[in-house]
Amino acid sequence: GRSVYRVYNDDMGRANIDKFNLMTQIRQALKDKQFRLFYQPKMDIRSGRVCGVEALIRWPQPDGSYIAPDDFIPLAESSGVIADIGHWVLQEACEACMRWRQQGHGSVGVAVNLSYVQFRDGSLERSVQQVLRQSGLPSSALELELTESMLIGEGDDISRQLSAIHQMGVSFSIDDFGTGYSNLGYLRRFNASRLKIDKSFITDLGVSQRDEPLVRAIIQMAASLGLHSVAEGVEDEATLNLLRQLGCDEAQGYFWSRALPEHEFIAWLKQHNAISELPHSSEL
Ligand code: C2E
Ligand code: MG
Ligand code: MG
Ligand code: MG
């Protein structure tokens, strides 16, 4: 203006425009049903069998690439559209899991990641109830993944919602454990079944000793609290063997499979189940 000086940082302007464009595209993508769920198996370390599946969102692009959730979920959260995306994810995951059961691919359950926004807006309980009813999936087959930060300082209303959902028969896991806060008080108040050790602690386990004491302690703590421990990001056999020695219950990672589109996941599952039906190689 006439007497006002304004410092305009061009980069900042561009960043805001990019964000605005991306936000508009996210809304449009939801309307156009562009999002897809991919599925990654979760393995029982002792039996070597698939014990669950995690649903992970993907945003396919016209050039065949995908935008990763870490690159659009935070923006979807800040604009509030995550509530609708989150409901879609729940619905899609429950329907898919129900389809697998009906097609005879076994009775593994599905785990869905939640955003703190779905939590705070008070719609979660209704949303969960609705998708279970519509899909016909038994509540025991649904697991919700929450991060520590969602559970720190949670208010009464959130506690009430969580215990209502727990009473429906849905289970909870704590995702990315170890990266949040060191206040562990929430573990006492909150009914979780699984502790998922963040992959940053698992990645170098096979090659370096550094993280072993920490991972060992987390597994022991989980066990003494009556929680199953799950290792995220297992990429090689050395890591798996060490986790087995440490008494970890379950694992997930590229060693078995990346997250796959539904038809590829089913093919993987069939092949894996066929192999694990065979007598153990040492018995042959
Ligand atoms: P997360 O829930 O902790 O998911 C684990 C991430 O690790 C996934 O990344 C998965 O593809 C990746 N991963 C699995 N195994 C390995 C491995 O062996 N090595 C390595 N390096 N990575 C592995 P992804 O799919 O990119 O998801 C990132 C995060 O985005 C998730 O972390 C979750 O917090 C969030 N997210 C994903 N889908 C949804 C969703 O539907 N709703 C919400 N609210 N958040 C989601
Ligand atoms: Mg997760
Ligand atoms: Mg995680
Ligand atoms: Mg994560």
Image (tube, rainbow, N blue to C red):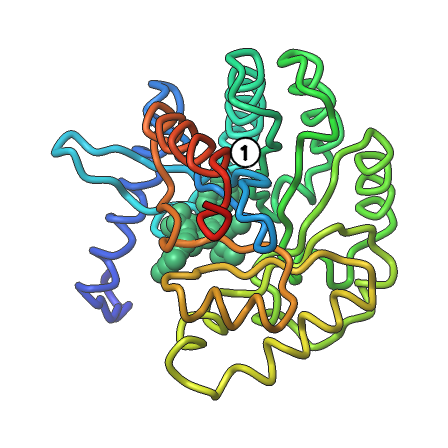
Q: In the rendering, at what x and y percent does residue 93 appear?
A: 53, 27
Between 204 and 142, the one lying in front of the other is 204
Q: In the rendering, at what x and y percent does residue 221 appear?
A: 75, 72
Residue lying at the far left in this picture: please name it. 63
Left or right: where 224 falls relative to 106: right
Mark 1 Cβ inside 8 Å of ligand 1: yes
Residue lying at the far front in this picture: please name it. 284
Q: Quadrant of the C terminus?
A: top left
Location of residue 266 with respect to 161 vertically, above or below: above
Between 233 and 10, the one lying in front of the other is 233
Q: Residues within 10 Å of mark 1 (few under 14, many from 20)?
A: many
Query: Which residue appears at 77% of the width and 65% of the height?
Result: 223
Image quarter of residue 10: bottom left
Left or right: where 202 falls relative to 1: right
Q: Name the residue tied to disc 1.
A: 86
Location of residue 1 with respect to 143 vertically, above or below: below
Query: Which residue appears at 53% of the width and 48% of the height?
Result: 48
Residue lying at the far bottom in this picture: please name it. 210
Q: In the rendering, at what x and y percent does residue 269 appear?
A: 43, 31
Image quarter of residue 233: bottom left
Location of residue 184 with respect to 188 vertically, above or below: below
Between 267 and 226, the one lying in front of the other is 267
Q: In the rendering, at what x and y percent does residue 14 appear?
A: 20, 55
Query: Which residue appears at 24% of the width and 71% of the height?
Result: 7
Query: Which residue appears at 84% of the width and 44% of the height?
Result: 157
